[in-house]
Amino acid sequence: MREKCGVVGVALEDRGAAHPCYYGLYALQHRGQESAGIVTHDGFQQHDHVEMGLVGEAFEEEDLDGLQGSTGVGHVRYPTAGSVDKACAQPFTVSFRSGSLALSHNGNLVNAGEIREELAAEGHAFTSDGDTEVIAHDLARNLLDADLVRAVKRTMDRIHGSYALTVMHDETVLGIRDPQGNRPLCLGKLDDGYVLASESAAIDTLGGELIRDVKPGELVLLDPDGTGYESYQLVEEDNTAHCFFEHVYFARPDSVIDEELVYDTRRDLGARLWDESGVESDVVMPVPDSGRAFATGYAEAASEELGDDGPEFAEGLMKNRYVGRTFIMPTQDQREQAVRLKLNPIRSTVEGKSVTLIDDSIVRGTTSTQLVSLLEEAGAAEVHLRIGAPQILAPCYMGIDMASREELIAAGQDTEGIRETVGADSLSYLSVDGVAEVLGESRADLCLGCVTGEYPYDIDGEETDRDVTRPEIDGPVVADD
């Protein structure tokens, strides 16, 4: 799995927005590494800089100096809808009769194609194949005959899917979260203004204070002078569809998502994993870095139950942080070599011992197979694999670049079959109910599509877990013969 996207928006009293946006994007870099961009407004016109690459690669000091104005929005992207090129990099900008727009989008629309087809028939010219441009054109059309709040409401009534948006209409910055709250978005206070961001870690980086999450279906308007904000609850649903994988994998451990510190949640998930499927072993070790909090919670729960007979917690796999995911791996042999480049076992920690290896998830199973093999080669007597999430058996349509069903190891076999494939002595996943109980939410308020095969949105060819239908879009007008 790969990260989604990160969005940020700021409105300040009397200083430029470019540098705060830049630092906020740095804090959200884990959510996207393909492109980075910032758009500001100086009260008269927009200024934008969008480039491919990491935040530090996309901006020079002179680029930031050219982004004038005290309001701005920013974006880091990993593409889940649209091409991997600058045409789909964000923020997406458009100028029209009623002003200018800049949009940063985290999520994925289900019905973008239908709306695009309708708008194109009306004469809208699209420059990319991404869904963010569809939102921009629809909002621009609605702004021609409605005020900002009503225009946003009309667009929200038409788009179907997951979205957390930071938008700038002229010099006004706004945040919008979809009615199910699938993607995270939060609001923070700075000494001289306000900030919207995908995660609270970005607010921390700016020296600000988290106010709260933007509510599902809510529009937050930041005052252009940075002195306050307004809130409008535009859509209300009976149930949310929070992405449970934000807590399991995607969000930074130091972020607060839906009022829960992610690090604490992962420790609690690890403790629940011990309660459900704990196995006595000599050593508990994480797959770095994502398995660390789970392993800590698991080991502590084991020690509380077993006392001095509990397992030792140890860092038995050392990570080479200079091998990124851009490493070229065209063949299976090279993919196996890449794992050895990234992770190396500490032989003295595992030799002759039974090891419990904790990871957040298994997708294709390739990495898990190689890690089990590495530990066995290092002398481990037994390798027990414990996973802090349920089996991933279906793709994600909501903004996570996840494998297809054909590639998912859990889509075609049960836990015992997966255990045999990866070569572990035992294998257990955390249950779906266990995840929901640790998060303190009912299953009806979570998006669990990737682990149940039932989705909270109306997706062609897929089952739903609730009564939901996508909005009807008129489509292009076809002339009679």
Image (cartoon, rainbow, N blue to C red):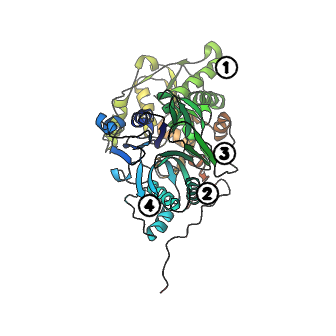
Q: Residue 128 location, x and y as percent?
A: 38, 57
Q: Residue 30 location, x and y as percent?
A: 44, 36
Q: Is residue 118 visible in this depiction of the protein?
A: yes
Q: Is residue 384 left or right of residue 431?
A: left
Residue denoted by label 1: 305
Judge depth for marks 2 and 1 and give the one in front: 2
Return the disc, 2 or 1, that comes first in the chain's sequence: 1
Q: Report how far apart the C-alphas of labels 2 and 3 lie in the structure.
A: 16 Å
Q: Residue at x 44, y 60 (%)?
A: 97
> Circle 4 sits in a helix, a strand or a loop, which is it?
loop
Q: Report how far apart the C-alphas of labels 3 and 1 lie in the structure.
A: 32 Å
Residue type at numbered disc 1: Glu
Residue type at numbered disc 2: Glu
Judge depth for marks 1 and 4 and give the one in front: 4
Q: Which mark, by number, is residue 463?
A: 2
> Circle 2 sits in a helix, a strand or a loop, which is it?
strand
Judge depth for marks 2 and 3 and give the one in front: 3
Q: Residue 248 location, x and y as percent?
A: 55, 36
> In terms of depth relative to the viewer, which is nearer, 97 or 280?
97
Residue denoted by label 4: 97
Judge depth for marks 3 and 1 and give the one in front: 3
Return the disc, 3 or 1, that comes first in the chain's sequence: 1
